Image: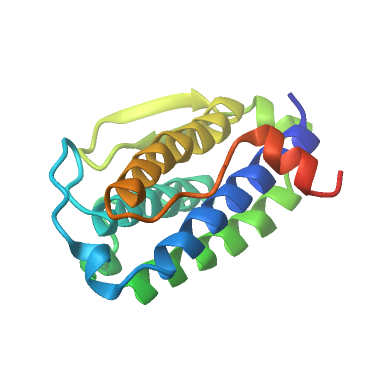
């Protein structure tokens, strides 16, 4: 994998997130915080907040930070606040990714989990993890949207490649 592949992967990630977020923004306001039951996350709000906070935490780590708690906006019930955070994080992350080099991909990233437990991971693996994490939770959002009567848009990588310029 090289920096072009990573930028392409994150282009897909941002495209897929944007498609789902537009679908979420088009739902009635009460749908965002409605308790839909389920396992890990009970509402669309909870999943969006989780994706945004995880993306924020990883970007902070990539930039040398070491967050020890969730950002204040994590607890917001405002759909607009959380969607704006995701957009801002994507923009900051895009600028970061444009500066990536082959040497960056091979280096190790040392960080601490929110629990304080230290870890070291190859940077390329962390970059792939973040996209994979978002993909998993987009599946949860798609299911939740169906549950409230909103058909989710397709977010498959192949759709991205056929609809987006190369």
Which quadrant holds residue 161? Answer: top right
Seen at 35% across and 47% down, the residue is 146
Whether residue 155 sits left or right of residue 139 in the image: it is right
Task: State the image coordinates of residue 64 (x, y, percent, origin top left).
Answer: 49, 49
Seen at 78% across and 49% down, the residue is 164
Which quadrant holds residue 156? Answer: top right
**Which residue lies most toward the right here?**
166
Seen at 40% across and 44% down, the residue is 142
- In this rendering, is residue 86 above or below 147? below
- In this rendering, is residue 63 above or below 40? below
Task: State the image coordinates of residue 135 (x, y, percent, origin top left).
Answer: 48, 36
- In this rendering, is residue 97 above or below 117? below
Task: State the image coordinates of residue 62 (x, y, percent, origin top left).
Answer: 53, 46
Residue 55 versus residue 103: which sits nearer the camera? Answer: 55
Which quadrant holds residue 18? Answer: bottom right
- What is the quadrant of the C terminus in the image? top right
């Amino acid at each position: 994998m090289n920096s072009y592949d990573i930028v392409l992967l994150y282009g897909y990630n941002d495209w897929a997130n944007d498609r789902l977020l537009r679908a979420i923004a088009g739902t009635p306001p009460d749908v965002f915080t409605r308790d839909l039951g389920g396992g890990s996350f009970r509402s669309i709000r909870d999943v969006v907040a989780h994706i945004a906070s995880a993306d924020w935490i990883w970007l902070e780590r990539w930039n040398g930070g070491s967050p020890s708690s969730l950002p204040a906006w994590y607890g917001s019930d405002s759909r607009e606040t959380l969607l704006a955070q995701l957009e801002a994080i994507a923009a900051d992350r895009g600028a970061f990714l444009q500066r990536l080099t082959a040497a960056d991909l091979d280096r190790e990233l040392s960080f601490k989990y929110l629990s304080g437990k230290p870890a070291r991971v190859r940077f390329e693996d962390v970059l792939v993890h973040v996209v994979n994490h978002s993909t998993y939770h987009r599946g949860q959002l798609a299911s939740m949207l169906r549950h409230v009567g909103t058909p989710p848009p397709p977010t498959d990588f192949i759709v991205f490649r056929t609809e987006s310029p190369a």
